C-alpha cells in the first residue's frame, strides 16, 4: 500500500478481485454546485454507479490522506464547507504535509485513482486550454494528467470558456486519443457540438473498452478522453451559453482573476447568469457520464483487464 493512500475496504477488495470500479471527482462537489445540490448530485452519482453494478470511488484529500471512497459525512463536509481548497496534482503534497482536506480536480483525481488501481473515471467537464491562452498560458493541468496517467476519463467535452480547437491540438500533441461515444463531434458541455471533430466515433462501451485494452496492453501509457454529449433534451441553446460565457470572461479579466481561481469563478458566474437551467443540464450530463463510465468499467473488467497492480501502472 502506498503511503498517504486511504482506500475503503469495499474498494480495496473489489480492486484486488478485478471488479468494475468508477472514480468520481470532488472539485465538482466543493466548487461545481452550491450546497445542498452538490451533495445530492454526488450521492446520485454513487447510486447510479451501484445501479449499474459498479462500485463508486469518490476521491478527495481528507485530513491529509489521499482518500479513495468517502463516507456520507465526508461528502457532506466537502459540500457544506466553503473553505475546501481545489486540489490539482501540484496541490497534493502541501495538503498531505499539512493534514488538510482538498477537493480533487480531474487531474488530482486521476493521479490518486491511478495509485489505487482504478482505470475509469467519470466527470462533468474537463479543464483545457483557455481562450486567450496564447497570452495567459492558462492550460489546465487536466491535459497534462491525461498525457501521463493511464485512465479513461468520461466527460461531456470542454465548457465554452475554453478553446476547443486549442484543447484538441494540445491533446493530439500529448498523445491522448479522443473517442466520441455515438458522436463524431467534440461536444461543448452544455451543447452537443463544438464544431471540431473527435479522433474516432465508437458506438458501444465494449468498443471503447477494446481501445483502452489495446492502448495499455501495447505499453502506450497515458489517458484516453471519452466524450459523451449531453442528451438532446437537456442541451441549452448555444447563443444563451455564449452570451453568459462572454460576460463571465470579461468580468474575470476586469477582476484580475488568476490561476486556480479562474475556472471556479467562470463556472459560478455562468450558473448565476443562466439561472437554474445550466445547473439542471450540468447534473444530467454528469449522471449520463457516470452511467457510460460504469458500462465501460464493466466491459473492461469482463476482459480481465488490469490497468494497475498494487499502484504500479501497467
Ligand atoms: N469544468 C467544468 N466543471 C468543473 C470543472 C471544470 O465544466 O467542475 C472543474 C474540474 O474539477 C476540473 C477543474 O478538473 O475544474 C479544472 O480546473 P483548472 O481549469 O483550474 O485546471
Ligand atoms: Mn488554469
Image: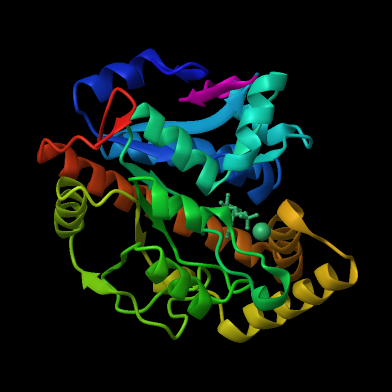
User: Is residue 167 rendered to the left or right of residue 217?
Assistant: right
Task: Please state the horizontal and vertical placement of residue 188, each as a whole percent of the image.
Answer: 50, 73
**Magenta residues, start to end:** 64-73
Q: Residue at x 57, y 76 (%)?
A: 163
Along the viewing direction, whichever of 83 and 215 lies nearer the viewer:
215
Coloration of the structure image: rainbow
Q: Identify the image quadrant of the C terminus.
A: top left
Q: Is residue 312 above or below residue 29?
A: above
The location of residue 148, given as percent across then percent down, is 40, 49
Q: Tell which of 168 and 67 is nearer to you.
A: 168
Residue 144 falls left or right of residue 232: right
- Res. 171 in view: yes
| Residue 230 appears in the figure | no
Residue 71 in magenta stretch: yes
Q: Quadrant of ligand 2?
A: bottom right
Q: How many discs appear?
A: 0
Which residue occupies 46% across, 66% down? 157
Residue shown at 15%/50% (left/top)?
Answer: 218
Residue found farthest to the right: 255
Q: Is residue 179 magenta?
A: no
As displayed, is residue 59 above or below residue 100?
A: below
Task: Tell whether 173 sits left or right of 25.
Answer: left
Instruction: Tell me the residue at 72%/38% (across/down).
Output: 85
Q: Quadrant of the N terminus?
A: top left
Give the x, y percent position of residue 47: 40, 35
Task: Please state the horizontal and vertical placement of residue 155, each as a whole percent of the image.
Answer: 43, 58
Q: Residue furthest left?
A: 303
Amino acid at each position: 500500500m502506498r503511503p498517504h493512500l486511504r482506500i475503503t475496504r469495499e474498494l480495496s477488495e473489489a480492486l484486488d478481485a478485478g471488479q468494475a470500479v468508477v472514480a468520481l471527482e470532488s472539485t465538482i462537489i466543493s466548487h461545481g454546485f452550491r450546497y445542498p445540490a452538490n451533495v445530492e448530485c454526488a450521492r446520485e452519482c454513487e447510486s447510479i454507479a451501484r445501479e449499474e453494478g459498479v462500485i463508486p470511488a469518490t476521491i478527495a484529500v481528507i485530513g491529509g490522506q489521499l482518500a479513495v471512497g468517502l463516507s456520507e459525512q465526508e461528502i457532506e463536509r466537502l459540500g457544506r464547507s466553503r473553505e475546501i481548497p481545489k486540489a490539482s496534482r501540484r496541490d497534493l503534497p502541501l495538503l498531505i504535509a499539512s493534514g488538510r482536506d482538498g477537493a480533487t480536480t480531474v487531474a488530482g483525481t486521476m493521479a490518486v485513482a491511478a495509485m489505487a488501481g482504478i482505470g475509469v473515471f467519470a466527470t462533468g467537464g474537463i479543464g483545457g486550454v483557455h481562450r486567450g491562452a496564447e497570452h495567459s498560458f492558462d492550460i489546465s493541468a487536466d491535459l497534462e494528467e491525461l498525457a501521463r496517467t493511464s485512465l479513461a476519463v468520461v466527460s461531456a467535452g470542454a465548457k465554452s470558456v475554453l478553446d476547443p480547437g486549442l484543447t484538441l491540438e494540445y491533446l493530439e500533441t500529448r498523445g491522448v486519443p479522443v473517442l466520441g461515444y455515438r458522436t463524431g463531434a467534440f461536444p461543448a458541455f452544455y451543447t452537443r457540438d463544438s464544431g471540431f471533430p473527435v479522433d474516432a466515433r465508437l458506438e458501444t462501451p465494449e468498443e471503447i473498452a477494446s481501445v483502452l485494452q489495446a492502448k495499455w496492453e501495447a505499453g502506450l501509457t497515458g489517458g484516453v478522453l471519452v466524450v459523451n454529449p449531453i442528451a438532446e433534451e437537456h442541451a441549452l441553446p448555444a447563443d444563451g451559453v455564449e452570451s453568459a460565457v462572454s460576460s463571465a470572461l470579461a468580468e474575470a479579466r476586469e477582476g484580475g482573476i488568476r490561476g486556480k481561481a479562474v475556472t471556479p469563478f467562470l463556472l459560478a458566474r455562468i450558473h448565476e447568469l443562466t439561472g437554474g437551467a445550466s445547473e439542471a443540464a450540468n447534473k444530467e450530463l454528469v449522471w449520463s457520464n457516470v452511467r457510460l463510465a460504469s458500462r465501460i468499467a464493466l466491459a473492461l473488467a469482463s476482459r480481465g483487464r488490469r490497468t494497475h497492480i498494487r499502484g504500479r501502472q501497467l
